[in-house]
Amino acid sequence: MSTADFATFSDNAVMFASIVYALAFLAHLTEWVLIRSLPAPQTTAEMAAQTTAQAVVRDAVPVGGPAAGPTEPAVPVADPASGREEEQELRVEKYGRIGVALTVLACALHLMALVSRGLGSDPIRVPWGNMYEFTLAGTFGVSVMYLLLLKRFELRWMGVLVTGFLVVVLMLDVLVLYQDAGPLVPALHSYWLAIHVLAAVIASGAFSVGALTLVLFLAKDRAIRRGTLRPRGYLSRLPEAPVLERVAYRMHAFGFPIWTFAALVAGPIWAEYAWGSYWNWDPKEVWAFITWVIYAAYLHARATAGWKGKAASVIALVGFASLLFNFVGINYFFGGGSLHSYAG
Amino acid sequence: MSTSRTATSRPDTDAGGSATAPPTPPSAPPALGPVELSRWAWRQLTSMRTALVLLFLLALGAVPGSVIPQQNIDSVKVAQWQEAHPALTPVYERLGLFAVYGSPWFAAIYILLMVSLVGCVVPRLRVYWRAARARPPQVPRHLSRLPESRTFEVADPDPEAVLARATAVLRRRRYRLAVHPGAVSAEKGYLREAGNLLFHFSVLVALVGFAAGQLFGYKGGVITIVGQGFSNTLSQYDDFAPGRLFNSDDLSPLSFTVDDFHVKWLTSGPAMGQPSSFDANITYRTAPGAAPRHHDLAVNHPLAAGGANVFLVGHGYAPVVTVKDGKGNVAYRGPAVFLPQDSTFASFGVIKVPDAVPQQLGFEGLFLPTYGFTVARGPFSQFPDALRPVLSLVPYHGNLGLDGGRPQSVYSLDKKGLKTYPSSDPSLGPVKRLKLEEGQTVRLPDGQGSIRFDGVQRWVKLQVSHSPGKGIALGGVLLGILGLMGSLFIRPRRAWVRVSQAPVGPGDPRRTVVELGGLDRSSGGDLSGEVEELERLITASSGPSGTSDTTPTPEEHA
């Protein structure tokens, strides 16, 4: 294939990946619609059991009694009236699995899009040299992060949100930010491009998944406090609020050292080579630092009595807003005023 | 900073970490003596809430510096901004908003934060020193009340032997142990707090390194026309940003000549008009008598010599012109630096001719490397390379305003004493504008002289900088990441095992009951996984026939 063929292939792969993410989104949506017709967990004890049961079948459907331990197979409820329910549960499970399978497929297409984008530039380079490509790589980071942690943290309940997010961001990327594949500007001729941007992309992926989880946590937390948690609603099918909060914390704890490396080590070292000074108070640097400080505040707040939970989560979401602003806003509002303007 | 400046560590929170209520707000202090007052103030300052507020203020305080032009970054832009906002300028100036990162209020935030950090970390150092050498705590009476616990039986009839094996299991999993009669307590993850302390310490180290660079370093920009030279003295710089404690004697005696400059432009493809590479060949000496050496300066390929670093940060065109005055004498000859305005390198500049008689002359306008013209856009540049260079200038006559002794920018005209010429073709605008191709001469109206566009030279913008302490700053941040990872990923845990003889019915084999309890002292750990693994290992080491009746306690799910 020629360079131009690769570039075209990449564009097509992005399109197909978006379509398959959209299908995965629909599958997960169907999963949740079907779940609404199932009886909901009634008591906290049962909800607790549900959490345990999830560990077995990776689903939000209560199938195990309170005694179902993590090592035992799920015990179907021995209620004759539940035959139809059981069937329904299987359907729910089926759509959930279809959703995950489609997400895996879409993620593979997404990877192909990234790789061929790199091959489609002359000379061959890492596929993150402008905003379109950063977004392509960043969304890939979110997708991979979700799939890798799916099993470990039982994240399938997040599927509908993650796939929806990916579809929207990929569409915006193609519609608003698209640039033809081409060579890099001279300032980016450095192997630090691979290191610095890769670290930023991984950290942003972790922060994004963490932020999505925190939004769910805050919604559920609020519904519980106000007593408006509908037993058949989406929120009541999510893992327990503390579980959500803990998953989100782990994402942030994973992302934070990587962000520190990207913003405060790799960035300054490269800046020293490229711009002659390791810290230039460039808007992108300033906002990367602001983001870092806010996430640091989140980690501190979470470890403090009285702040853990809602208050700390809000701080983390402010951090995410600052991350997004740094990614998009700086290039829009500051344009050529930023040394990072070639990223546009 | 990191996660576990925990509740237990800050003086205003409940010791023991179980506090769910927010720290009591500082009630108005009763009449206090100076000692109590300062102690109260110190407690407030080193409280976690204050630390959080200061972190937020730091983030918030950094924002204006990214929005408002900064003196030490782009003084030209500051001047432009101040010209455009005459009403706001004095207010902003008083608030230090044109030099946010050096302003007293910004310094106040980070100094308070550092004091708060030291005030928090130093006492913890003492606590940690004791805790790190302490024996694991006593076995709680009711292990089943712990967040995670198991009770199971093993086939081995001898409790002491079971306990010995359980102890071995814990030791293999790197727990620190304290053996009691019939029980053992174990603890691990001491390095978490060490990582935490290391992180906070290295924040200070990084800051010291950074401050050294800001205080003693300098950064200067110089535009040098290709073929000309530069020697490292203050007067040679176009802009110079020294640190507060910088001494001009510290400038290294570096000098160099820019021999040649190459730029390659992409002439096809989607990125057409973008430079694919540019570099400058320079000859430098680290000291006046030293042997000359060559270096190829390019982006991402700086020169480090004699304690200073030289970087290629930009390039542009310097059209060479000859101006004759009304008497026919050459009043000006040479290259004038024009500054690129966009990616097509349409460049703006001025030419000042103070020696012209009877009136001084000035020219302001654009250099267009590849000339293009449409009625809608007027003259513009089609491509950044100098393929068809054209100067489009507005001539002025009168007084350049240079005699008042007030320093003037070489990139703008003071038009107070200057007049334009009327346009000869009113359809092109009211003001006379000259278009000069390379080699062309144009006469000014009323016999006031002529201007000739002789040719094009290039200039490079070089940045010379010296930032001491950058190794310290880098080392600090790297240490900080190491500490951060320790404080985020090491799980401090306690485990207890108690063994006893199982009650036996007639004819049953004698067995041993094992009680196992675990406590995770961080938040977010997978404690049940660890306790499960311990149970599996203890059961496996105590004979294969051990049937376990695991009863997860209700708390397990919480």
Image (tube, coloured by chain):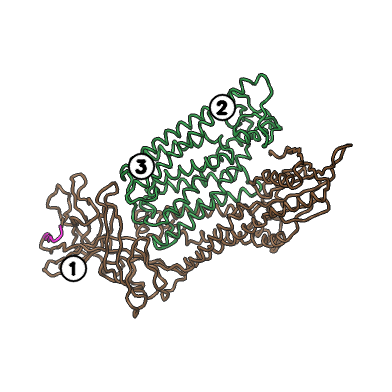
Chain colours: A green, B brown
- Tag of residue A178: 3
For the residues marked 1 and 3, what is the alpha-carbon distance in whole angstroms?
A: 47 Å
Mark 3 / mark 2, whichever is N-terminal: 2
Q: Residue at x 62, y 38 (%)?
A: A241
Residue B414 seen: no
Return the residue at label 2. Answer: A92
Mark 3 and 2 residues: CB-CB less than 8 Å, in contact? no
Dot 1 and dot 3 residues touching (CB under 8 Å): no
- Name the mark nearer the viewer: 1 or 3: 3
Whether residue B525 sits left or right of residue A178 in the image: it is: right
Badge 2 amino acid: Val
Q: Position of residue B60 (x, y in %)?
A: 51, 52
Q: Quadrant of residue A11?
A: top left
Q: Is residue B460 magenta?
A: no
Q: Disc 1 vs disc 2: Cβ atoms closer than 8 Å?
A: no
Quarter residue A111 falls in: top left
Q: Which residue is mark 1?
A: B333
Front residue (pair A13, B172): B172
Binning the other alpha carbons within 10 Å of mark 3 as few (below 14), some (14 to 19) or many (20 upward) gives some
Q: Magenta part of the protein: which range?
A: B437-445
**Secondary structure found at label 1:** strand
Outermost residue, top direction? A81
Residue nearest the viewer, comparing B86 with B447:
B447
Query: Disc 3: which chain?
Result: A
Q: Which amino acid type is shown beneath numbered disc 3?
A: Tyr
Q: Residue B93, image x and y in percent?
A: 43, 59
Crowd around label 1: few <14 · some 14–19 · many ≥20 (10 Å): some
Are tags 1 and 3 found on a single chain?
Answer: no
Co-location on one chain, circles 1 and 2: no
Whether residue A169 is visible here, answered yes or no, is yes
Left or right of B41 on screen, residue B268? left
